[in-house]
Image (spheres, rainbow, N blue to C red):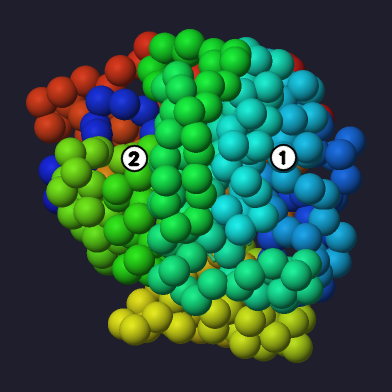
Amino acid sequence: MSTNTSVSQVADLETPLKFAYWVPNVSGGLVVSTIEQRTSWDFDYNKKLARIAENSGFEYALTQTRYAASYGADKQHEATSFSLALLGATEKLKVISAVHPGMWHPGVLAKFIITADHISGGRAAVNVVSGWLKDEFVNFGLEWLEHDERYVRTEEFIRVLRGLWTEQEYSQSGKYYNINNFTLNPAPLDVPGRAHPEIFFGGNSTAAQAAAGRTADWYFSNGKDLAGFEDNISGVTAAAAAVGRTPKFGLNGFVIARDTEAEAKDTLREIVAKAHRPAVEGFRAAVQEAGASTKDGKGMWADSSYEDLVQYNDGFKTGLIGTPEQIAQRIVDFKKIGVNLMLTCYLHFQEEVEAFGRNVLPIVRELEADLARKNGTELNTDLLPETNFEGATL
Ligand SMILES: Cc1cc2nc3c(=O)[nH]c(=O)nc-3n(C[C@H](O)[C@H](O)[C@H](O)COP(=O)(O)O)c2cc1C
């Protein structure tokens, strides 16, 4: 694996990287393959996973929103209710609930999240996703907007959320939503370090980058290599700078940490060899509604190979596959180009989340401290999440 030595201007070397995991709230695991996956989508498994994660150095969990099977995920638990239950089962973990603007009225969602925020002591967050699975919308009788138009609606949606969370007697009129002089009581909790529940944004296309830059607190990308992620960051940063904003960046990666690089690569080969070919091909057809359908043909899955699509968020591209040392180095290479948060997924979530906390995170922290020093600054260790492997042990 190549390493990157230069440090970008947008990199924040003082703040420790944050870690998140994908909540497996849909069936079938995070790869569409018949390889063994000791991961379950049920609540008991997820409750235990969430507790393991918050004790192993993970600060966030991200739920998925899915209403229908397609590309595996034959069964799905609804994202916001599942997230609320996970908040109730944990003490520190922030749970980011995926939400589709086309499925929610932003005022109803704003109210729901305020309630979740109060119940959880200020740990609720959202990931606003604009959608790709056309059948979910069409078969619900909802309007399916053309690609870039979805982002027009998403921007309005996020403005409503932020407006209702921060202002009294809020009004906004637009193409998709009209809010008239509305005050939500109570307001979200007053938590240091955030103005309101955090707003994440998932999308890769040019329209997604521009909308995220103008409105989101966090931009989430599908899996990417270093050059691919740099491209995303520059698009988002340019849009953000034009309106004086500085969003943070999260990146998805599928982690295969093994004692040797050869073992890790063998596992990847086995995942791909045992992939469910018709499902992967079906997915490739469905996601033509995403980036590939845009004018410039850029965006999520537009340049993904068959192998990439076996992990449905392109997580192999990020290259978190090897020994703990190799993975830690790769993660810090992404920090150098501006990543603030790594969103991770695994074959066997409970055991691998704990192993990641024990074996990979300590090396990441050492490398981060080193990197900061070499660049004339210090890693702010006060911001490091506490670990408690006694509490984490399976
Ligand atoms: C981190 C992340 C999480 C996502 N989660 C979901 C989800 O839960 N449900 C969903 O329908 N789409 C999800 N998406 C996909 C987006 O809805 C969108 O279709 C995709 O990012 C394609 O965007 P693009 O066409 O602008 O590249 C997610 C995307 C990212 C990057």
The tag on residue 346 is none
Which residue type carries mark 1? Thr
Q: Which residue is mark 1?
A: 80
Rendered view: 252 above or below 218:
below
Element type where label 1 sits in the image: helix
The residue at label 2 has a CB less than 8 Å from ligand 1: no
Which residue type carries mark 2? Lys
The residue lying at 24 percent from left, 32 percent from top is: 13
The residue lying at 23 percent from left, 39 percent from top is: 245
Q: Is residue 70 left or right of residue 146?
A: right
Q: Is residue 299 visible?
A: yes
Image-quadrant location for residue 110: top right
* Residue 58 x, y percent position in the rendering: 57, 31
Q: Which residue is mark 2?
A: 248
Rounded to the nearest angstrom, the CA distance separating label 1 from label 2 is 23 Å
Q: Camera-side residue: 341 or 362?
A: 341
